[in-house]
Image: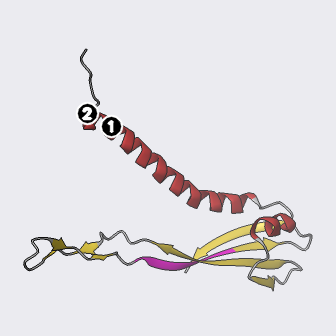
Amino acid sequence: MVMFSASPLYRIPRYAALLCLIALVALAGCVSTDSASKSLVGHPSSELVARWGEPQMKMPDGTGGEAWTYIEKRELPSSDPPRSMTYNTVGGGGAITPYNPAPSRTYTEQRTFSIGSDGIIKNYERKEQ
């Protein structure tokens, strides 16, 4: 009886598909937060508090309503490749490779909801600083 084993090349499409799926799920997380925020427009402000908690800032808007702001610091990994160097060790015949991760980018994300005097969310705005 002859047994066939799967070649390593046969498995590459599976790994590629898995990596694509992971990337899509990660990107969906970014998009879904913004979509979820926009979907609150027209709903009572109590739904916003139930999902996000109390805002960091509440300011009157001059028309009897308020502007509620949520602030979050975020960090994005750099698109630069990690930096590493290989050094030969004396007498040991091996090598030491220190790893220096690429620097990341930190930014502040600000989400502001306009709440009408009736307690209904009228508008949503997102800014990065």
Label 1: element kind: helix
Observer-nearest residue: 73 or 38? Answer: 73
Identity, as a three-letter code, of the amino acid under mark 2: Ser
Q: Which residue is drawn at the image coordinates 37% and 44% (left, top)?
A: 16
- Point out residue 54 in the picture as x, y percentages from the top left corner: 79, 76
Left or right of 118 in this view: 100: left
- Image quarter of the C terminus: bottom right
Q: Can you tell which mark lies on residue 11?
A: 1
- Point out residue 14 in the picture as x, y percentages from the top left corner: 38, 39
Question: Pointers 2 and 1 in contact (CB under 8 A)?
Answer: yes
Left or right of 72 in this view: 9: left
- Image quarter of the N terminus: top left
Observer-nearest residue: 53 or 97? Answer: 97
| Outermost residue toward the left in this view | 91
Label 2: element kind: loop
**Magenta extent:** 104-111
Badge 2, how many Cα within 10 Å: few under 14, some, many 20+? few
Q: Which residue is drawn at the image coordinates 50% and 75% (left, top)?
A: 75
Q: Which residue is mark 2?
A: 7
| Placement of 16 over or under 61, stated as above or below | above
Which of the 4 image quadrants contains residue 89? bottom left
Badge 1, how many Cα within 10 Å: few under 14, some, many 20+? few
- Point out residue 94 in the picture as x, y percentages from the top left corner: 14, 70
